[in-house]
Amino acid sequence: MFAAPPELDRLLTALTRPDALIEAGVLALALLIAAGIVALLRSRVLRARAAAGETAPLASIWFGEALVDGVLFPTLALSLAYLMRHLLRDAGLSLAVFKVAIPVLLSLALIRLSVRVLTVAFPTSRLMRLVERTISWIAWAAVVMWVTGVLPAVMEGLDEISWKLGNHSISLRTLIEGTLSAGFVLMVSLWISAALESRLLAGVQGAQLSLRKAAANALRAMLMFVGLLVALSAVGIDLTAFSVIGGALGVGIGFGLQKLAANYVSGFVILAERSVHIGDLVRVADFEGRITDITTRYTVIRAVNGREAIVPNEVLITTTVQNLTLSDTRLLLSTSVVVAHGTDVDALIPQLVEGVATVPRVLTDPGPAVHLRSFANIGLELAIHVWIADPDNGQGNVLSDVNLKVLSMLRERGIEIPRA
């Protein structure tokens, strides 16, 4: 027969006493108070967002997407549970329900913190979903072992598994505690960096958006580095040993990571010089599109057909980049048509200019222009040039409208387009 641990036996016995009903009622009251406070604050935030014209769903770290989905509810519930426990203890009641509830609320707060921070910091990463599930399993397993009284025995067993690392002895318990401490510190660093980044990028467009994006990336990297150092110090690792690692890392960057380092440096140069901005229409090699994001390593360019190119930042520094909207959004488009040799081009050219000017999206200042480009064997080649101010809405559709207009005018006038 399986024998339950003595700690679990005592807990189950305490849960059957009349005092447990009082504890359950007090705990339910604490949860209701926490839910009421969160609902009140959430409604105020929603009203403020509605007054500011924001229509996007509320999905912050504190509130989450639902009433109990953020960090605020479990944190408030945990604080109230601690307060209620002290009051009941002073009243002379034996505590059983709160012995289970407080670890559960603590675990829930840690899980919600990790999930919300990772969701905000890495919204599209599939790996983060696996990390979230892993954190949840570890947290709930720790709660079960704590409640049943198994956790102290497990920690002692882990403490006995140790090995030598230089002059220091490291146990498996120390390694696990250090990993958890480092993860918590890095999570808080990500939280702070995400909050500061949202503040920096709120309501900013154009060049200012690119500049603040650079500041946000640098701020996140700095906070992550400082958080890692704090976490390592908390574990007890001597940071002076990292001088050797730093030298080895420098050699690695100089050889194996040269391209990666060049991309990161190029990213900061691009964002600092502001030669290209988020929203610019650019052409890199044979790919043309609008810049949708600039990170420290690469730039995302989205074409009008929906394709996206991830261009390493070094390419934008070392090759020629045509920025079609750097200082002026107006863009020149050209097409051509061949008419028969006997055509009166002196009369036709002004008519084509007038007709093409009526095509939607074609600018009148500067206006269209038609020139006799060359004398071909089959006829006279006319070059037609038009300007548009919104190239992000497409260029081929405007050229198609211009060609259709020219074809219609030639047919109306009985002018033949010779065949090759």
Image: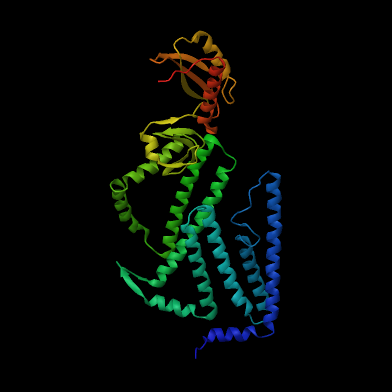
Tell me if residue 31 can be seen.
yes
Please provide percent x and percent y for residue 100: 59, 76
Q: Is residue 419 above or below residue 138?
A: above
Image coordinates of residue 322 in percent, x first then y, are 43, 30
Q: Is residue 261 left or right of residue 21?
A: left
Asked if residue 388 shows in the view, the reply is no
Identify the colour scheme used: rainbow
- Which of the 4 image quadrants contains residue 22? bottom right
Work out whether 414 lies above or below 123.
above
Determine whether 281 is above or below 338 in the image. Answer: below
Quadrant where the image shows the C terminus: top left
Q: Nearer the viewer, residue 206 or 100?
A: 206
* Front residue (pair 291, 32): 291
Q: Residue at x 50, y 9 (%)?
A: 344
The structure residue drawn at horizontal position 69% and vertical position 56%, both measured from the top left corner, is 41
Residue at position x 57%, y 22% in the image: 363
Quarter of the image for residue 418 reads top left
Query: Picture coordinates of residue 395 (x, y %)?
Result: 51, 30
